[in-house]
């Protein structure tokens, strides 16, 4: 398919933003498999036609339409959407209409290049005949990923609540997989059972998500935990515990990070990866924190004309954060009665961790806030090694590495950086094997979980 080089900058305003999903199919890129599919299922519960894009099949397209200077996730998602549109165009022929789809691609404000993905991809899509009608649904961290505008206003709050629950349940399914798979009775059995359980939970969100019947969803989740637990062999001794952080897409997208968790498990690890809901909590906390700072500044300047809007923002984001943390605690409380899964860190606690040692500041933002503090907490909790997963040249993760690596050297905790792009690094497996030898020695010397 030939492309043209004409750029229509008006499409940034007309075709990137919030669009009603009524009568359109919502295309969701796959990041972490569990959470992406549960989110799509929850959308379908509200009558939204939602599907998860097949991922990594369009890498040649993604690389052909990027320069290589972009973040690796930009290349992957670029390839995913182009591959889908080309396949759909070939399948439907003259009936294909790009305007019938909304490509769901959130963004972030601040210095991270993630904020520019949808703009760049808009330019590329407009260069393809027949693809310019596709709209990009760009939710943003600037308002805590509000869902205003994509569905009727009366249903926005319910959709937001149940979508957050879908992400938390997806995180728990991921952590269940990583908790059980290193101790499975038969190789490959955990993945097989988890795939069946994912379908079971997708059905739960399709049936109960719209009506916020979370007890029914949680009951199914408890049944899943019991079924997956049965795969474990209790005779296998505890393994070195590895804490993983990094850029959210790379650390959760299995193909993008070349299945680094399985590689770590191959050499004797049990891994806990940072969650997706931690990032959602961080965006709400960051907006709440900004609103609180603005309110204090206005009071000092006696700018009473600004107080109404600032108080509204404070209560809005504070309410979002309260609901998210409350719901997250509720779900983890139910599941940890059945199996000892690692719980998420509270974001305000992570800020306190950074302040204690003056390592970094939440004023600077980015995922480095979570990664640096998260790794320090992993050390306090007795983890035996730390892994930082990120796209090659990722600014926040390089910042994280520059701060954490010398700290871990002093603390004698094994640490590994694993940057990724479209290539396979020579010696990658050797580096992981060496790291796991060090983690095993740390585990033998100090135990795990501080025991």
Image (tube, grey):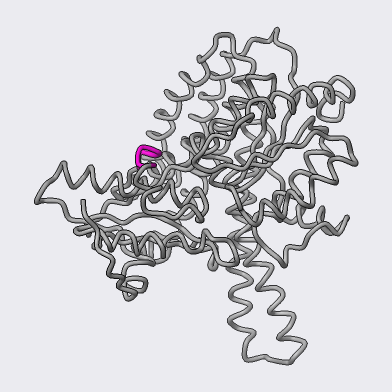
Q: Main secondary structure of the magenta part?
A: loop
Which residue lies at the image location 47% right of the left edge and 55% below the top edge? Answer: 160
Q: Is residue 300 magenta?
A: no
Q: Residue furthest front?
A: 426
Left or right of 319: which side holds 361? Answer: right
Left or right of 422: which side holds 342? Answer: right
Please provide percent x and percent y for residue 340: 69, 27
The stretch in magenta equals: 53-59
Q: Nearer the viewer, residue 246 or 101?
A: 246
Name the quadrant containing residue 303: bottom right
Residue 233 in sight from this viewpoint: yes
Which residue lies at the image location 28% right of the left edge and 45% below the top edge? Answer: 84
Which residue lies at the image location 37% right of the left edge and 47% below the top edge? Answer: 79
Q: Residue furthest left?
A: 94
Q: Nearer the viewer, residue 270 or 221?
A: 270
Please provide percent x and percent y for residue 401: 74, 48
In the displayed structure, 8 sits above or below 181; it is below
Please provide percent x and percent y for residue 149: 37, 66
Name the quadrant containing residue 120: bottom left
In the displayed structure, 289 sits above or below 449; it is below
Please provide percent x and percent y for residue 74: 46, 52
In the displayed structure, 374 sits above or below 218; it is below
Residue 207 in sight from this viewpoint: no
Quadrant of the image containing the C terminus: top right
Q: Nearer the viewer, residue 401 or 11?
A: 401
Query: What is the total number of numbered labels drawn onto the structure image?
Result: 0
């Amino acid at each position: 398919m030939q492309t043209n080089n004409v750029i229509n900058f008006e499409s940034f305003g007309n075709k990137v933003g919030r669009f009603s999903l009524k009568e359109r199919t919502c295309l969701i890129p796959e990041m972490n498999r569990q959470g992406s599919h549960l989110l799509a299922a929850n959308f379908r519960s509200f009558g939204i036609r939602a599907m998860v894009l097949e991922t990594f099949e369009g890498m040649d397209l993604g690389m052909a339409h990027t320069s290589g200077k972009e973040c690796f996730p930009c290349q992957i998602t670029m390839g995913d959407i182009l591959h889908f549109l080309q396949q759909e165009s070939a399948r439907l022929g003259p009936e294909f209409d790009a305007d019938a789809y909304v490509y769901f691609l959130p963004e972030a404000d601040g210095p991270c290049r993630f904020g520019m993905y949808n703009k760049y991809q808009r330019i590329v899509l407009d260069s393809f005949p027949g693809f310019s009608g596709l709209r990009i649904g760009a939710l943003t961290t600037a308002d805590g990923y509000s869902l205003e505008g994509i569905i009727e206003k009366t249903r926005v709050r319910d959709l937001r609540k149940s979508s957050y629950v879908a992400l938390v349940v997806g995180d728990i399914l991921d952590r269940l997989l990583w908790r059980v798979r290193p101790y499975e009775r038969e190789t490959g059995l955990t993945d097989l059972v988890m795939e069946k359980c994912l379908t079971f939970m997708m059905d739960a969100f399709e049936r109960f998500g719209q009506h916020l019947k979370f007890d029914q969803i949680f009951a199914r989740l408890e049944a899943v935990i019991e079924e997956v637990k049965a795969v474990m062999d209790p005779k296998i001794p505890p393994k070195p515990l590895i804490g993983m952080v990094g850029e959210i897409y790379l650390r959760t997208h299995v193909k993008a990070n070349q299945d680094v968790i399985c590689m770590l498990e191959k050499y004797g690890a049990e891994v806990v990866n940072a969650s997706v809901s931690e990032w959602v909590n961080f965006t709400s906390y960051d907006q709440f924190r900004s609103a609180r700072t603005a309110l204090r500044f206005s009071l000092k300047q006696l700018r009473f004309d600004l107080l109404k809007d600032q108080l509204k923002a404070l209560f809005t984001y504070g309410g979002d954060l309260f609901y998210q943390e409350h719901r997250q605690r509720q779900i983890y409380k139910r599941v940890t009665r059945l199996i000892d899964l690692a719980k998420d860190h509270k974001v305000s606690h992570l800020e306190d961790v950074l302040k204690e040692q003056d390592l970094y500041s939440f004023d600077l933002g980015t995922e480095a806030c979570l990664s640096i503090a998260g790794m320090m907490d992993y050390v306090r909790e007795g983890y035996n090694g730390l892994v930082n997963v990120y796209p090659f040249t990722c600014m926040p993760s390089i910042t994280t590495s520059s701060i954490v690596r010398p700290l871990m050297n002093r603390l004698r905790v094994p640490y590994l950086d694993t940057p990724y792009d479209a290539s396979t690094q020579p010696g990658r497996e050797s580096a992981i094997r060496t790291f796991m030898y060090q983690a095993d020695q740390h585990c033998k010397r100090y135990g795990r979980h501080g025991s």
